[in-house]
């Protein structure tokens, strides 16, 4: 049953880290020289993952990860993931021109392949469906509640009253 035990280990790791924002789980369930391979490059060591996780926690008002499907064989576990993230606009100091908070869901999908060594996660290969995520962020930008309050819109791309944002952007 090593495959099933390893799958349970990865499920616990993902839940504790992303749903409960428990950074100590990284030290508990990964090897000291843990490596995460992502399209942008490799995260080397536990501390690198902690830095990235904190950045996500600070950037999104909500992160929840659901395991859609998971299978384990020998020392490898493959997990299909549905990310439920929310972006809260108006809460960051750079959002000063937004006069109210707008909370928008931005779903994403991904796959993680984890290699287990002696009961700890030694290596992970993570792929997020970035195009799907960017599409959802683009949909956010089309929401009139967001666009009317977008900080850049007050300095927007207006020209001779032909503003793609609308008449509330300021210069139009």
Image: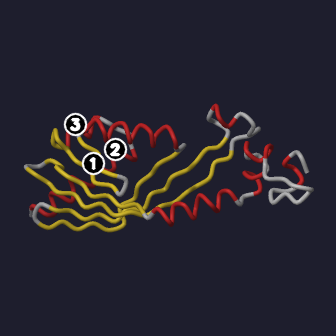
Q: Which mark is residue 13?
A: 1
Q: Residue at x 77, y 38 (%)?
A: 99
| C-alpha span from label 3 to label 1 | 10 Å
**Count of all numbered marks drawn on residues in the image:** 3
Look at the numbered discs 2 and 1 and tell me whether their residues touch, using CB distance below 8 Å: yes
Residue 125 in percent (x, y) is at 27, 58
Q: Residue at x 91, y 51 (%)?
A: 172
Residue 10 in percent (x, y) is at 24, 54
Q: Residue at x 73, y 45 (%)?
A: 152
The N terminus is located in which quarter?
bottom left
Instruction: Looking at the picture, tell me which residue is in the foreground, 90 or 35.
Output: 35
Q: Which mark is residue 27?
A: 3
For label 2, the crowd category at 10 Å Cα-Cα, with few meaning under 14, some 14 to 19 and many 20 or more, is: some
Look at the numbered discs 2 and 3 and tell me whether their residues touch, using CB distance below 8 Å: no
Label 3 sits on a secondary structure element that is: helix
Label 1 sits on a secondary structure element that is: helix
Q: Which residue is mark 2?
A: 17
Q: Name, please, the residue furthest toward the top.
A: 93
Whether residue 164 sits left or right of residue 35 in the image: it is right
Quarter of the view holding residue 61: top right
Return the disc, 3 or 1, that comes first in the chain's sequence: 1
| C-alpha span from label 2 to label 1 | 6 Å
Q: Residue at x 49, y 56 (%)?
A: 84
């Amino acid at each position: 049953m090593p495959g099933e035990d390893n799958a349970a280990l990865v499920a616990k790791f993902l839940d504790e880290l992303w749903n409960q924002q428990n950074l100590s789980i990284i030290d508990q369930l990964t090897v000291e020289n843990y490596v995460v391979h992502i399209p942008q490059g490799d995260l080397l060591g536990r501390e690198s993952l902690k830095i990235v996780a904190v950045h996500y926690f600070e950037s999104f008002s909500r992160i929840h990860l659901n395991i859609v499907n998971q299978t384990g064989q020998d020392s490898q576990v493959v997990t299909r993931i549905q990310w439920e993230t929310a972006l809260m606009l108006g809460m960051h100091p750079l959002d000063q021109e937004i006069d109210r908070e707008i909370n928008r869901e931005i779903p994403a999908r991904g796959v993680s392949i984890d290699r287990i060594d002696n009961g700890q996660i030694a290596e992970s290969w993570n792929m997020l469906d970035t195009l799907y995520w960017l599409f959802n962020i683009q949909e956010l930008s089309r929401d009139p509640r967001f666009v009317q309050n977008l900080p850049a819109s007050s300095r927007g791309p207006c020209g001779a009253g032909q503003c793609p944002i609308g008449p509330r952007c300021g210069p139009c």
